[in-house]
Image (spheres, coloured by chain):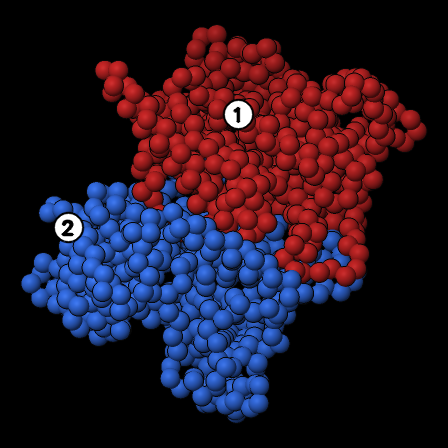
Chain colours: A red, B blue
Amino acid sequence: MKTVQVDVAVVGAGTAGLAAFYAARKAGASAVIIEGGEYGTTCARVGCMPSKLLIAAADAAHAVGKAGGFGVCVDGDVRIDGRAVMDRVRRERDRFVSFVLRDVEEIPDAERIRGQACFVDDHTLAVADHTRVTSKSIIIATGSRAAYPDSFTSLGDRVITSDDVFNWHDLPKAVAVIGPGIIGLELGQALHRLGVRVAVLGRGGRVGPISDPEIRAYACVTFNEEFTLAPDARIADMQRYGDRVAIRRAGPDGSDVIEYFDYVLAATGRTPNVTGIGLDRTTLKLDAKGVPSFDPLTTRTVSADRASPIFIAGDAGNFIPLLHEATDEGRIAGENAARFALGRQVKPGLRRARIGVVFTDPQIGIVGGGLHAMKPGSFATGQVSFEDQGRSRILLRNKGLLNVYGDLASGRFVGAEMLAPAAEHLAHLLAWALQNEMTVAQMLEMPVYHPVIEEGLRTGLRDLDVKLRAARVNVDKAA
Amino acid sequence: MKTVQVDVAVVGAGTAGLAAFYAARKAGASAVIIEGGEYGTTCARVGCMPSKLLIAAADAAHAVGKAGGFGVCVDGDVRIDGRAVMDRVRRERDRFVSFVLRDVEEIPDAERIRGQACFVDDHTLAVADHTRVTSKSIIIATGSRAAYPDSFTSLGDRVITSDDVFNWHDLPKAVAVIGPGIIGLELGQALHRLGVRVAVLGRGGRVGPISDPEIRAYACVTFNEEFTLAPDARIADMQRYGDRVAIRRAGPDGSDVIEYFDYVLAATGRTPNVTGIGLDRTTLKLDAKGVPSFDPLTTRTVSADRASPIFIAGDAGNFIPLLHEATDEGRIAGENAARFALGRQVKPGLRRARIGVVFTDPQIGIVGGGLHAMKPGSFATGQVSFEDQGRSRILLRNKGLLNVYGDLASGRFVGAEMLAPAAEHLAHLLAWALQNEMTVAQMLEMPVYHPVIEEGLRTGLRDLDVKLRAARVNVDKAA
């Protein structure tokens, strides 16, 4: 067995791991990066990129269908060439993956170790059966994987996850998507627009990351105008019949509905890869799911003696499983692991204002944790509907509802939830305003061009401004 | 002749005039608003709104053409139904106009005067031959009109302006657009995408509002991949032949090229409506074009005794002829005219960070006056190409070049020019950052989601940040 001694060992060469490795080296530490699976990130292989590619094809099909409304007539059939659609998805996906592989290849061989890493103790990792790494600090960046309940396994190869979709060579006829989370909504709507019969079925009523009941109800109605979305589907059972799956669930009138699908796409969440890596041999404090507790500002885990040499970043930490957060966490972990290894003080890193986008159409946007993060009674809500918003109507995209939240005491903008056209862009404008700690009044002093979708946002902010001012008058009167 | 005596008289009931009228009344002044033409704003009747409607149809046609690249096959003909296209443009345009008319109708009759207003002196207006308005202060909000050189008149009814386009009931076969300004580029590309043979011809090399030669050159090449754009066309002559116009110009090899068009669309600029309103009977200082000089912060004009009771707002002032600026100027003019009339001090109003968008594809975005507004030697330039930008490529919209400018002394972001996908949204993010006086380093601390077009902007900001830091190191070394 080979032995390696370094300042920082990074377990996992995905987005967070690579960011951590580069940051640790840049901070002057010696480092190795260990990967037990394929190189390439979740984002590039099975996440952000291939899903956006599938959505781009779906939106292209949708645009063709809408063209008639503008006077652009398609006098023949519109045919979704499933093989061509999936070919572009895989080809462009492979290209994105190749960029990651190229970056990895540039890391000197001596600093890259292939094999499954397992903790021996807080400072030692065994990699497969060939290498023993002793390290002053260790970064866990093992990522996450798609997960579904054991009961699904009875469906055999008819149950798939998002990972499988992007390896398709053609489109199936009918897919039941279980779980209307981010992935379920994105893939469900995209497959529907590509001509696949789709039902997106959930339990408990959740719709993506939306926590505001007004936005959720609006989203549910809007999506149902296009495809079946039952956030609380009350599935009685799922049975395999030949190459298909029958799903029995309670219909609207109480009687049972049985529908057949080619596949059950389990979009039931992702689970951090923290089992089987020997965390029980460390002194780390684990939560109920077996994930090490850690400080999001420093990414340092919590050990029995509170002097943990172990850091965690990205999906493995189960904190905010998003690419840009994984990059930030990776960098913070790398810098702090290096500091720790070199005998310096661990420091809080830059955490940015929270932003979430779901690439449905209309898109979902969440800023600052949304309603869920608000303290009841501390805020006012401004609202705008996009149904009559000028530019949105011009574009035949006038579907949307946006709630903006303002802090009663300070007048500051504190968050938003929306189903809206161009939500990805509105969310950036709002997230930057949030991080700049802007008041709603200050935001209304900012320029807004004409005619743009941002004018809808301004209408919502004006509504919020009126409510914040009214609340202040009431406080003044009471005083 | 009827006589009317008020605090504030507003001449013109367009965007600026209406904003001024409402603001003056809100500030406690008595006011009248005088309109000599049709009610309805330039924006709604012949500007922002109908042009965006035409562009929406054009982009729908373009999207159908691009769908094959995603695997979405149109197996028949794509037919532009010119009558349906123009029907939607006019119908939706009329709807936008109706909102303006509804607002105007809500103004009490006593406060609305119909007829051409003409100054008698600094405090007096004659309206047609029926009313004499004496007013403590007056606001000029007479707008602008499309204008072209006298030489064009020989083409008779074959020369048209943007005003005419939006009254079409069908699309013509071939149009020469003279003037690659904002309107010329928008309408030229839109008509091209709707199947009209188009040549956009200019003089002197200007391309829209772009002042950065790198962005201009890139835009010129990009547009020419789609349609003829000759910013310096060296037109030898334009002659009418029957129902068509022959344009003779120097071809690429020096020999003459003659091309025939159904119409010459004169997009040669707009001229402020300041002639024929009796400005010579006021004490106002006029510029070479006959436009009153004024302070953009207060909108107050300059009179011989420097105590002018006359304010000016919107296109009439020829300052920044954009809807959102006209609204701001109108409000400032209304507030200040009311203050003046009521014996209070005139105050500077809120002027926002400058933002300009041209709704071509890719769009043009200008923030903070662009390169043109920069002091040579005071700034560094960061650049990003969108040709390899992840999300843009996913969407098959990977065409674009963006330059961001940073102040060498302060490290602040000071402006940008771009031809870019989603430039309208990037420009808002940048314009808000500009008004917030953010440094480039601060902007890089802001959240950016993944995968989004804003990541391209971030790449440009990183490039700028490196250059600003390098310049600072050099300064430090020299010191």
The kind of residue tagged 2 is Ala
On the picture, is A248 further left or further right than B459?
Answer: right
Closest to the camera, between mark 2 and mark 1, is: 2
Residue B341 numbered tag = 2
> Eyeballing the image, is A254 above or below A398?
above
Q: Which residue is nearer to you in this view: B326 or A138? A: B326
Residue at 24% across, 63% down: B131
The kind of residue tagged 1 is Asp
Q: Residue B22's x, y, as percent?
A: 30, 47
Q: Which residue is nearer to you in this view: B19 or A468? A: B19
Residue at 56% across, 44% down: A398
Residue lying at the far right of the rendered structure: A242
Q: How many labels sit on residues? A: 2
The quadrant the C terminus of chain A occupies is: top left
On the picture, is A435 further left or further right than B56?
Answer: left
> Eyeballing the image, is B306 above or below B254?
above
2 and 1 marks in contact (CB < 8 Å):
no
Residue A112 numbered tag = none
Q: Give the residue number, with chain letter if any, for mark 1.
A: A212
Q: Residue B56's x, y, as percent?
A: 57, 57
On the picture, is B378 further left or further right than B210?
Answer: left
Residue at 46% across, 73% down: B161
Callout 1: SS: loop
Q: Is residue B124 visible?
A: yes
Residue at 6% across, 63% down: B305
Q: Chain of mark 2?
A: B
